[in-house]
Image (cartoon, rainbow, N blue to C red):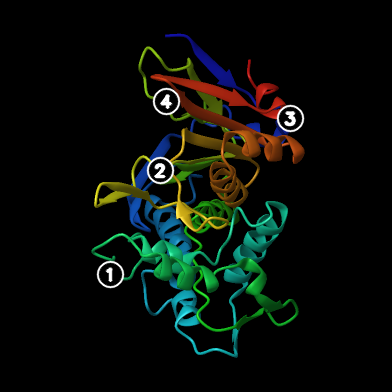
């Protein structure tokens, strides 16, 4: 099958400093945030592998301690369970992620919304015990009344956020990407110049391998004859995130529900889109935009991606075939 490749336009000379270094690729893996993680690192000779692995897992744990809605002791969970009318001081990392989430909420007119926690819980994809039956119109209405990013009030100087009452944050569509960025940032501070870090299909690549080759990552493909040709991206100073609903699904009384909720309709998404992939400099941005564009759907998602000049790739079903569409910015990287 034909293969296509994505190459970044601008590669900094510093990205090639590990070329010819002779450093081997050290590989680490494990579980975090309910999924798997992998890291491929060219470790400088003065750093041992155990130090490097500790740096990665510590960076992940910082995000878990702050933004994990499955952990009742995390900052996010404490905010979600707090009484109405209270202010809460946020750690710097939590505040950075929330600000990015709110910014993308504004740009997408609420298609991306960090306050959908009540709706996600109601459909059985959050930390609360799922309903044994499809949610009623009243249950949907109650959850919807407690949803909306515009309810979030925050103080920029002191990094505080206001709990209006019943607002439930869910940062799962942006926190994994941030955790990848956090790990890469920590590795670079340790002296690492080249690495590829992934959490559950969200990637960020920096630098190159010792032979001068980039970190190659395949975009999600089905491998069937009715699929477009495979695309492989060179992640050199780039991140890749993909959003879809094929994994997290449940059926109640014959109706399919998925983990992605449209904040405008309060319903889960089961339309013709298969996946949306976004390339961006940081993984947090790619992660959030991939979710937002998937929620918007093919037509509106493509329009918004074009409006903001995003490197976005859409896959959708047309009869039994998988068809692709992408933005000009994405096409410009195809060789």
User: Label 4: how many residues lie within 10 Å, few (<14), some (14-19) or many (20+)?
Assistant: some
State the residue lying farthest toward the top. Answer: 1
Q: What residue does disc 2 label? A: 245
- Residue under label 1: 129
Q: Relative to 205, say whether 261 is above or below.
A: below
Q: Mark 1 or mark 3: name the one nearer the start of the chain.
A: 3
- Rendering coords of residue 272 (x, y %): 46, 33
Give the quadrant of the N terminus: top left
Of 264 and 198, the residue lying toward us: 264
Dot 3: what SS? loop
Q: Nearer the viewer, mark 4 or mark 2?
A: 2
* Label number found at residue 10: 3
User: Which label lies toward us, 1 or 4?
Assistant: 1
Between the C-alphas of marks 1 and 4, the distance is 33 Å
User: For the residues marked 4 and 2, what is the alpha-carbon distance in whole angstroms?
Assistant: 14 Å
Which residue does the numbered mark 4 point to in the structure image? 221
Q: Residue at x 58, y 30 (%)?
A: 313
* Nearest to the observer: residue 91 or residue 108: 108
Q: Is residue 125 left or right of residue 154?
A: left
Instruction: Give x and y (percent) for residue 17.
Output: 64, 34
Lower sequence index among marks 2 and 1 = 1
- Closer mark to the observer between disc 1 and disc 3: 1
Is tag 3's residue or tag 4's residue first in the polypeptide sequence?
Answer: 3
Marks 3 and 4 sit apart, C-alpha to C-alpha, by: 26 Å
State the residue at coordinates (48%, 86%): 82
Q: Compared to 169, does 238 lie above or below?
A: above
Mark sitting earlier along the chain (1/4): 1
Tag 4 secondary structure:
loop
Contact check, label 3 and label 4, Cβ < 8 Å: no
């Amino acid at each position: 099958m034909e293969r296509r490749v994505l190459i970044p336009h601008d590669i900094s000379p510093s990205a090639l400093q590990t070329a010819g270094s002779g450093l081997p690729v050290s590989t680490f893996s494990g579980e975090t945030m309910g999924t798997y993680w992998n890291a491929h690192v060219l470790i400088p000779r003065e750093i041992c592998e155990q130090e490097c692995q500790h740096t990665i897992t510590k960076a992940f744990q910082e995000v878990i301690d702050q933004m994990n809605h499955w952990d009742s002791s995390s900052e996010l969970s404490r905010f979600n369970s707090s009484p109405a009318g209270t202010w809460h001081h946020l750690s710097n990392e939590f505040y950075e992620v929330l600000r990015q989430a709110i910014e993308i909420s504004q740009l997408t007119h609420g298609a991306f919304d960090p306050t959908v926690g009540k709706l996600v819980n109601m459909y059985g994809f959050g930390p609360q015990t799922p309903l044994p039956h499809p949610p009623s119109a009243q249950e949907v209405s109650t959850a919807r009344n407690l949803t909306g990013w515009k309810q979030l009030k925050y103080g920029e100087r002191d990094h505080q956020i206001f709990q209006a009452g019943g607002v439930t944050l869910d940062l799962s569509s942006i926190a994994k990407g941030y955790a990848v960025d956090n790990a890469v940032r920590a590795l670079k501070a340790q002296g690492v110049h080249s690495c590829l870090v992934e959490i559950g299909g969200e990637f960020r690549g920096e630098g190159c391998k010792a032979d001068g080759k980039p970190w190659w990552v395949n975009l999600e493909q089905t491998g069937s004859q009715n699929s477009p040709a495979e695309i492989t991206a060179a992640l050199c100073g780039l991140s890749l995130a993909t959003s879809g609903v094929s994994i997290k699904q449940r059926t109640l009384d014959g109706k399919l529900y998925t983990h992605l909720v449209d904040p405008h309709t309060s319903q889960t998404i089961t339309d013709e889109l298969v996946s949306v992939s976004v390339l961006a400099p940081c993984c947090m941005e790619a992660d959030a935009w991939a979710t937002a564009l998937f929620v918007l759907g093919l037509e509106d998602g493509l329009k918004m991606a074009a409006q903001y000049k995003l490197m976005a790739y859409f896959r959708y079903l047309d009869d039994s075939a998988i068809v692709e569409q992408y933005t000009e910015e994405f096409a410009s990287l195809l060789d």
